[in-house]
Image (cartoon, rainbow, N blue to C red):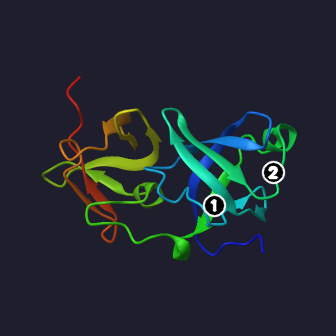
Amino acid sequence: MGELADPVVIGTITAPHGVRGTVRVRPAGEGRHLREGLSPLVGGRRRRILRARRTPKGFLVDLEGVPDRFRAAELRGEDLLLDRSELDAPEEDEFYVADLVGLEAVDERGGALGEVIETFPTPAHEVLVVRGEGGLLYVPFTREHVPEVDPRAGRAVVRPPEE
């Protein structure tokens, strides 16, 4: 029951919230999979989402089998995982964070800039971290800075911000 064929992180538990077992979750992306009824794998066990609500600091989520603050605190740092087959199909021009990591970053002429090694959220947008010969590039994941993403081809066209 604890195995997923193609796991995708939908969020990470950052802290307990209150005394009734609610956890604060930092979503991966928009957080649209943090909703009632889904049962992500959390700490090696499927736990149904009983309630989820968006806040300015992420999401507050009540999980099945987490009755109090002590149990919630034990889950700090745990990822909420779903199998890729359980995810909603992305909209056009929408990508799962997991699909961006590993892409080759190229400039508009096709010149290699490096590889996307991770992403992280900011209040405004996701940021791609590209490792290249010159070190790390931090690129806002916006249409202006990443005008084209082609996961099937394994590449993203990147316009690094001016320094």
At a point 31% along the width and 38% down the height, the residue shown is 140
**Local crowd size for mark 1, using a 10 Å CA cut-off: few (<14), some (14–19), many (≥20):** many
Camera-side mark, 2 or 1: 2
The mark found on residue 20 in the picture is: none
SS label for mark 2: loop
Q: Which mark is residue 81?
A: 1
Disc 2 versus disc 1: distance between alpha carbons?
A: 17 Å
Position of residue 120 in the picture relative to residue 72 (left or right): left
Identify the residue at the far top of this view. 163
For residue 3, which quarter of the picture?
bottom right
In the rendered image, residue 114, in percent from the top left (x then y), is placed at 35, 47
Q: Give the residue at mark 2.
A: 66
On the image, the x and y values in percent for residue 16 come to 73, 36
Specify whether 18 is left or right of 125.
right
Looking at the rendered structure, the secondary structure element under dot 1 is: strand
Q: Amino acid at mark 1?
A: Leu
Q: Earlier in the sequence, mark 2 or mark 1?
A: 2
Q: Residues within 10 Å of mark 2 (few under 14, many from 20)?
A: some
Q: In terms of depth relative to the viewer, which is nearer, 72 or 62?
A: 62
Tell me residue 74's x, y (percent): 83, 42
Q: Work out which quarter of the rendered image holds the N terminus and state it.
A: bottom right
Q: Is residue 152 above or below residue 43?
A: below
